[in-house]
Image: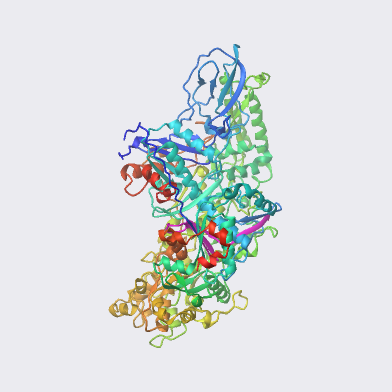
Amino acid sequence: MPPFKDEHILILAPGSQVTLAQLGLPESFTPARFRFPTRMFPAEKKGEFEPYKIRERRQEVPVSNGTEAPKEDVEMKDADSATQQETVKTETTAKQPEASANTEQKNENSQPVDGEPTDSAAVKPSTIEVYYEEDVTSDEGAIYPVQNGRIVDWPCFFALLTHVHNTLSPPFHTPIMLIAEPVWSARDRETITQFVFEKFKTPAFCMMDSALAVCYGYGTSTATVVDVGKDKVDVTAVTDFAVSEHGRGLALEGCGGDYMTDRLVELLGSKGFSREMCEQLKRSNITELLPPGTPLPGAAATSRQGVNPAATASTGAQNGSTNDTVPRGPGEGTQTDAGGNGEEEDEGVLDVAAIVSGNTSEFLANREKEKAEKASTKKGSTDQNAKPVRLPNSKKEKATFQFEEYVRIEAEKEASNGPGRYIRQTREIEVGVERFLAATPKQNSGERLTSGLLEDIATQIHHTILAVPDATKRSELWDSLIVVGNGSKIKGFTASLLGAITQKYILSPSATMFTSEIPSNFSTPLPTGGTNTPAPSGQPGPMNHPAGHGVNPLLVAATHSNNPASSSMPPGTPLMDPASISHHHRSTGHSQTPTSVKTLRPPEYFSEWKEQANTNAPGAAGPGGPGMASGGHGMEEAVFLGAQVASKVVFVLDQGLSKGFMTRVEYNENGPSAIHDYVM
Amino acid sequence: MNPSIPPSTAEYGGDEVSAIVLDPGYSTTRAGFAGEDTPKSLIPTCYGKYTYDGQEKLIFGDDIFVTPRPGLAINNPMGRDGIVEDWDMAERVWEYSFTSRLTGPKPGNPLQNGLNDAHESELPIEMEGVETEEKPLADSPLLMSEPGWNPTKAREKTIEIAMEKWGTPAFYLARNGVLAAFAAGKASALVIDIGASNISVTPVHDGMILKRGVQHSPLGGDYISSQLRALFKLNTPQPISLTPHYLISSKVAVDAGQPPQVKYKTFAPEKAPDATYRALLEERTLCEFKECVVQVWPGPNKLSAAGPNGVSNEDLAKASPGRPFEFPDGYNQVFGVDRYRVVESLFDAKAAISDPESVSPAPTQAQTVPELIKNALNGVDVDVRPHLLANVVVTGASSLLYGFTDRLNQELMQMYPGPRVRISAPGNTAERKFGSWIGGSILASLGTFHQLWISKKEFEEHGPNIVEKRCK
C-alpha cells in the first residue's frame, strides 16, 4: 500500500452536540475546520435522513431573483455574518440556491423552535409550484443520534457520518481516524468499523478513544482526563498511553453543561428568565465559577459561596446540607429591588427594539447607544459604592450580557401563507450574583442526592484514580488532571473543580509524612513529591520473591546471604538492618493519595489553538458578539488536536508498523471484531 | 494506488465471533472477550435498589459508588460462600456486566424496558415470534466460571439462564480454580484463591479438579475488613470512626492523632441512603487502607512467636517504621505493629482481634490458610502431592496484601520441609486479580476447546443436566 499523505487523512469526532471533522492535516494543527451539528432530520422516505429541516410549500413563485450565492451547507468557522440560507427547489427550474453565508448552525439549538426562514423573493406572483426548502436554522423535529455519548439511533448516526463524508468528499485513498466516545461498547465499535469499511471503502481505519486523543493533544502519556460534555462527564485515567477501563467514569449523567443551565433556570426562573436566556447567560463572559471561599460581591460575608464549611463548623453554619447552602440572591434588601427595576427597564428597551426592522439599523444603533448610556447611569445611581466600571467581573455585583434572539416581525404576521420574517436582535440583560452560582447544588436534584456538579465530578475522579491497579501511578494521575469539553468552558470551572477536590480529598501533610517513629537512619521522603514511597518494581506485590521465579528460596538464601535486601530469608537480626528496613518499607507498596492535585499545562506550540481560545464554542451566542464566552483556556476541544497528532503518527510516520490502524485487507480477513486489536 | 480509483469490492465474508468469558465473584463480576488479556468489564456484583417517584429502580455498575440516591440500599445476589442466592438478580447483574461494555443493550433487554414485573410476564409471548433476535447473547458463545463447591442445582440453573434467557449458541462452565491454574500456564496445580468473601484451596490435576481436596473458608478480604473495624474500635487514645466520603462535605487538615475537623453532610431522614450503602462505601476506604497500610508478617514463624535470637517477632515488627493513613474525615494516624495484627489470623487463628459485635464469627484454626492447604493435600492421592506442592498458584485480589506470598512460602516450607515447594504468584496486579478470568480467556480462545462447548442443540436434547456430564 502506498503511504498515506497528510492531505488525505479524514478525521471525524462525533459528539452529542457537534461533530468535528477535517480532511487533511495542515502544516500546523488547527482547530477542526468543519463543525456539523450532530443531528439529522427524517426525510420523506422512512429510514432516510436529511441534514436540514426540509419544508414543503406550495405557493406562488417569482420568476427569478437576482442574488445567487453558492450553497454552503456547512458552517465555516470564519464566516461572520448571520443571515439565513435557504435552498429552493422548484419543479421547473433547477436548484436555485438563494443564500448568503450562514453561521446559524452555531446556535441552532438555541434558537426558537418555531423559526421559519424568510423568503424575501416570494413576492411577485407567477406560477404555483412546490417548494422544498432547506431550513437551516430550524431544529424542529431533529433527531440527535448521540445522546450522552451513547448512540441511540444507528440509522441516523450513519446518515450523519455519510453526510459528513460526502460534504468533505475525500479521495478513495483516505485513511479515516474516528474518535470514539468512551461509553461506546465493544459491539458499537464493531458496528461502526463495519460501516466505515463497507460504506466508505476506506483503505485504513483507526478508532481512537477520546480520552487517549486528549493525551496525544497534550503530549502526555499519563493523565486523568475529565471530559465535560453537554449532559455528561467522562473521567478516564490514562497510564502510559493505556486507558484504564476499570473504574472509569463513563458518561456520568447530569454532570455536564446542562447542569449549570438548569441551575441558572432554577435561580433565575422566578425573575422571568427563560431557559434560552440562561443558556446564553451561561455562555456569556459574565458567568463565572468563583474558587471556594471567595465572597460573592456585594453579599454579606456569611453568605459566601462554597466556603470551606469545616473551617466554620464551630459557628454552626448550616451550609453543609444540600438544600440550604446557596444564598438565594444578593440578600434581602435594596439590591434585589434594584435588580428587579433594572430588568423592567431592559424589557422596555426590548419592546422598542422589537419593532425595528432590518433596514433601520441606524435607528437601532442609536437605541443601543442610548440604552447603554442609560444602563451605565443607572448602575451609577443604584450602586451606592460607586464602583468604577472597570472592576473585574467577579467583584461586580451586577453585570449585563447580550441576549440574542429571533423575533418575528410583527407587520408580516398577517401574511398567512407567506414565510415569516425574523430578525436577530440583541438586548442587554442584567444579572446579579446568581451568575456565580451555576455549579451550586440544585434544589430539585431528581433521583440523586447530588451535592453539586463539581463535587460529583470530584467523587468520580477519586473513584477512578483509586481504581487504577498500578498504585504507584496514582499520585501522578492526581497531578496531571486535564479538564476538557465545552461544558468546562465557563470561567473558573477548572479552578473550582480543583477547589472541590482539595476540600474533600487532599490528605493533610501529617498523614503523608512520617513522624518520630522513624529510625533516624531512615531517610524521610519529601512530602511534596507525591510518590514518597514508590516500590522499585512498580508493583506492590512481592514479585521479586525468589520463589516466584521458581528458584528454591533456600538456595537463594545460601548464595545471596550477603545481600539481605534481596532475600526473603532475612539473616541475623533482619529488621535491625537499615538496608532491610528500607527494603521492607519500600515494598509495602505505595502511600495514600492524593497529596496534591494539579492540572496539566496545555501545549503552547500550536498557535492556532491558542488564538481560537474562545471563538469556537458550539452554538455560542452568536458570531463574534460581545457576549461570547471568554472563560475557557481554548483547549476544550483538545481531543481534535490529539486526533491530528495521532493521525500524523499512526498513518504517516508509523505507516502501520505498530498496528496503529486496521487496513482493508485485515478487515476482509478478520472482520469487524478485529478492530479491538487496533483500538487505541 | 491511485487515490481516485475505488478499491475492489472484496468484502468480509466470515463471521468469527469471539466468545464471552464471564467470571462472577462475590465482590466483583468480570466479563470480557476471550483472547484478551484483561476483562473489559469489571463491575461490582452488588447492585443498588431505591424508590423514586413511587417506582422501584435498580442501579448496577460503578455508578453506585459515585452518586448516592434517596434511600439507596445495596444488595448482593451472591451468598457469602460464593453460591448464588437470588437468581433473578444474579442474572440481571451478570447481564449488565456484558451488555454495558461488550455487547450493548438490545431492545427487549429487561434492563431497558422499565423493569416491572407485569412487562416481564408478557415477555415470553412476545418472544415466540422474534426468538433469538432479542436475546443479549444470541451470537456469542459464553464461558462461565464457578467455585469448586458449586452445587448441581446451581450449575443447572446457570446453563438454563445462559441458554434460555440469553440465547447463547454455546456454553461451558469451568471451575475457577482450574482456570486460575491455566492462567499460570499449568494443568496441574494447587490453587490458593484469596477472594473477598472466601479463601479456597483447589487441587487441580491435568485440568480437572480433585473434588475431595477442595477446601474453602470465609477468611477473605471481607474478614480482614471486619478485623480492621475491630482494630479501629480498640484504637487508643480514641476509637477511630469510619465515615465514608459521601457523608463528608469538607475537611481540614489536622495533625496525626488529633480529632477530625470536618463538616458533615446531612441527608433528610427519608432520603438518606440505607446502612448497606454506607457499609459499601466504608468498604472502599477499608480497601484503600488494606492497599496502603496492611502488611502480612513475612515470617518465619508467627507474629506471636519469638525470632531466632530470642527477640519476639512482635518487637521486631514494632521496630519497623509505621505507615500513615488518613481517613475521609481527615483523622490520620501512623499504624505500627497493628497493621500486621489484622491479617495474622489468616495464618494463626489465635491472633484474631476479637470483636463481639462483628458479623464474622471468630475464626477457627481449621479455617486458616495453612490448615486448608494441609486438608486439601490430605484429600488427594499421595502420589500427586509433591507435584501439587511444586505448582502452588496464588490468585485473588486479597492475595495482593503485601507480604502474603512471603509468609505463605514460609508456612509451606515449615509444613512440608521435604518436597520442593514452589509458589507461582504473578507480580502484575491485574493478573493476580483476574486470574480465573484470564484462564477462561485462554481456554475459550484455544482451537481445541471448541469440541467442549455445549451447543444449544445438545442442551435442548439433554436438558440442563448435561452440564454435570460435560463440565467436570
User: Where is residue A528 shown, x and y percent of the image?
Assistant: 41, 61
User: Where is residue A193 shown, x and y percent of the image?
Assistant: 45, 43
Magenta region: B22-51
To which quarter of the image does residue B36 belong? bottom left
- Residue A513 visible within the image: no
User: Where is residue B383 shown, x and y percent of the image?
Assistant: 40, 80
Magenta span includes B443: no
User: Where is residue A75 shown, x and y percent of the image?
Assistant: 48, 30
**Residue situated in front as seen by the camera: B308 or B388:** B388
Tell whether A187 sits left or right of A531. right
- Residue A553 visible within the image: yes
Q: Is residue A365 above or below residue A304?
A: above
Q: Residue furthest front?
A: B461
Q: Is residue B138 above or below residue B303?
A: above
**Residue situated in front as seen by the camera: B44 or A79:** B44
Q: Quadrant of the N terminus of chain A?
A: top left
Q: Residue furthest bottom?
A: B310
Tell whether A403 sits left or right of B31. right
**Residue situated in front as seen by the camera: A448 or A193:** A193
Examine the residues drawn in magenta and state their main secondary structure. Answer: strand
**Residue situated in front as seen by the camera: A348 or A227:** A227
- Residue shown at the point (49%, 34%) measured from the top left: A36
To which quarter of the image does residue A332 belong? top right
- Residue shown at the point (49%, 63%) measured from the top left: A508
Count of marks overlaid on the render:
0
Render colour scheme: rainbow
Magenta span includes B31: yes
Q: Is residue A521 above or below residue B160?
A: below
